């Protein structure tokens, strides 16, 4: 699953768990949501690192 879908799934589990008083389901939802948030952040970091690598490569090409 993607980061956003994990977050939505997790939030849904949190709400349902809280509504019906199921602490395990609520905790599972919290874990799913946070995992989705971490996937999203990791993707953002990966994009930034790739951008820096591209800039370094371009800089090295210009020096030749």
Image (cartoon, helix red, strand yellow):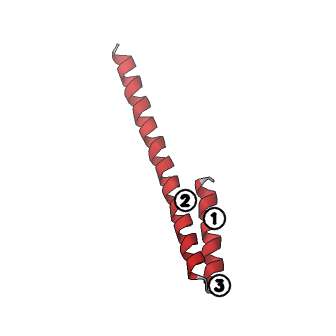
Residue at the farthest front position: 24
Residue 30 position (above or below residue 46): below
Residue ID at (48%, 42%):
47
Residue 4: percent from the left, percent from the top? Answer: 61, 57
Q: Is residue 56 left or right of residue 4?
A: left
The tag on residue 22 is: none
Q: Is residue 53 above or below residue 6?
A: above
Q: Which badge, 1 or 2, is on the more N-terminal residue?
A: 1
Give the vertical position of 2 relative to 24 (above or below). above
Instruction: Say whether marks 3 and 1 touch (CB < 8 Å).
Output: no
SS state under label 3: helix
Does label 2 or label 3 sit earlier along the sequence? 3
The answer to whether marks 1 and 2 mark residues whose Cβ atoms lie closer than 8 Å is yes
Tell me the crowding category of disc 3: few under 14, some 14 to 19, or many 20 or more residues within 10 angstroms, Cα based.
Answer: few
Residue drawn where x is 44% and y is 42% of the image: 48
Q: Which residue is mark 2?
A: 36
Q: Is residue 38 above or below residue 47?
A: below
Residue that mark 3 sits on: 19
| Dot label at residue 8 | 1
Mark 3–mark 1 distance (CA, rounded to whole Å): 16 Å
Disc 2 to disc 3, C-alpha distance: 22 Å
Could you say which quadrant of the image residue 5 lies in?
A: bottom right
């Amino acid at each position: 699953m993607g980061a956003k879908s994990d977050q939505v799934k997790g939030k849904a589990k949190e709400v349902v768990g809280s509504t019906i008083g199921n602490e395990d389901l609520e905790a599972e939802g919290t874990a799913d949501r946070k995992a989705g948030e971490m996937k999203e952040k990791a993707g953002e970091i990966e994009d930034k690192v790739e951008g820096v690598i591209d800039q370094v490569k371009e800089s090295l090409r210009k020096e030749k």
